[in-house]
Amino acid sequence: MSLENKVAIVTGGNSGIGKSIVLALAAQGAKVVIDYLFDPDATDALEKEVAGLGSQAVGCQADVSKVDDLQKLIDTAVQTFGRVDIMVNNAGVETRTSVLDTTEGQYDKVLDVNLKSAFFGTQIAAKQMIKQGEGGRIINITSVHEDWPMPGNTPYCLSKGGIRMLTRTAGVELASHNILVVGVGPGAVATPINTSTMKDPALLAKLDGAIPLGRMAQPEEIANVVAFLAGPNATYLTATTIFADGGMMQSSVGL
């Protein structure tokens, strides 16, 4: 298995894309720290699922908007598994609010959970990787909306645009330490965050019509990209974003 003896941290790891990332990394042999804030039962179930794949996982309750909690994730990985090789900054929220309607509280929540956590998650993980002296991978789960405007969801787009430049700048800064920093930019994914769209046939048809492949991605399809980027065949990718969007960004069909 390509990630055997590697240790990964996945923020927001007990549901949605994060859960699929945990399973994809574990299937390749990685040991995983599963960050979660809510639903410890789901985390326990995921730990057992990882064990069924022949690997190990441990849950760690941490609020990624707090730097001390991000440090807790690193400490848990080191204390439990001895090291950190892969940091996946996946946790994210959105408010679906516009420039005119967003409150200060909504703005702060989205930027703290999405961008602040990715920045300090990158910083703290990189320090541990430098201490280990063997390089590492930092993978930021961003979005097509790091580049593609989404009116009515402005704070989310701001946060993802920030992650775009974090990925590029950190990738350049950390290259001398052999720490690769790459973004993965999903398009529309069949996760709980899109439940309302998936339950509305008209909205779903409109969305599918805007995607050249004609459908939303499954979480596993995004996770497989992450597993590739974490592995031995992605040694010359850094400071960039890989878009896994079914061609959405290149489509002339608007939403």
Image: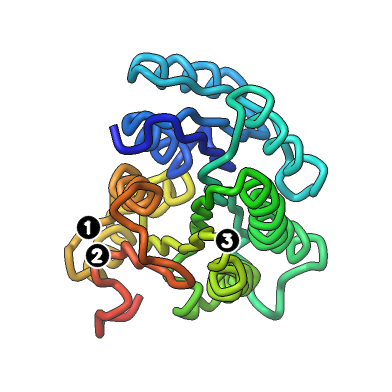
Q: CA distance from mark 1 to mark 2?
A: 8 Å
4 or 242: nearer the eye?
Answer: 4
- Regarding residue 87, the answer to whether it shows in the image is yes
254 or 61: nearer the eye?
Answer: 61
Percent across and percent down for residue 107 are: 74, 66
Dot 2 amino acid type: Gly
Say which element carries label 1. Answer: loop
- The quarter of the displayed image where residue 29 is located: top left
- The quarter of the displayed image where residue 204 is located: bottom left
Q: Residue at x 41, y 15 (%)?
A: 51
Q: Residue at x 29, y 72 (%)?
A: 248
Q: Which residue is mark 2?
A: 246
Dot 3 amino acid type: His
Disc assigned to residue 215: 1
Dot 1 amino acid type: Arg
Mark 1 vs mark 2: in front: 2
Label pair 1/3, CB-CB below 8 angstroms = no
Q: Earlier in the sequence, mark 1 or mark 2?
A: 1
Q: Earlier in the sequence, mark 1 or mark 3?
A: 3
Horizontal relation, residue 194 to residue 35: left or right:
left
Percent across and percent down for residue 139 are: 49, 55
Which residue ends up furthest to the bottom in the rendered image?
A: 252
Percent across and percent down for residue 1 are: 28, 32
Say which element carries label 2. Answer: loop
Q: Which residue is mark 3?
A: 177
- Vertical placement of residue 50 versus 127, above or below: above
| Residue count near mark 2 (Cα–Cα under 10 Å), binned few <14, some 14–19, many ≥20 | some
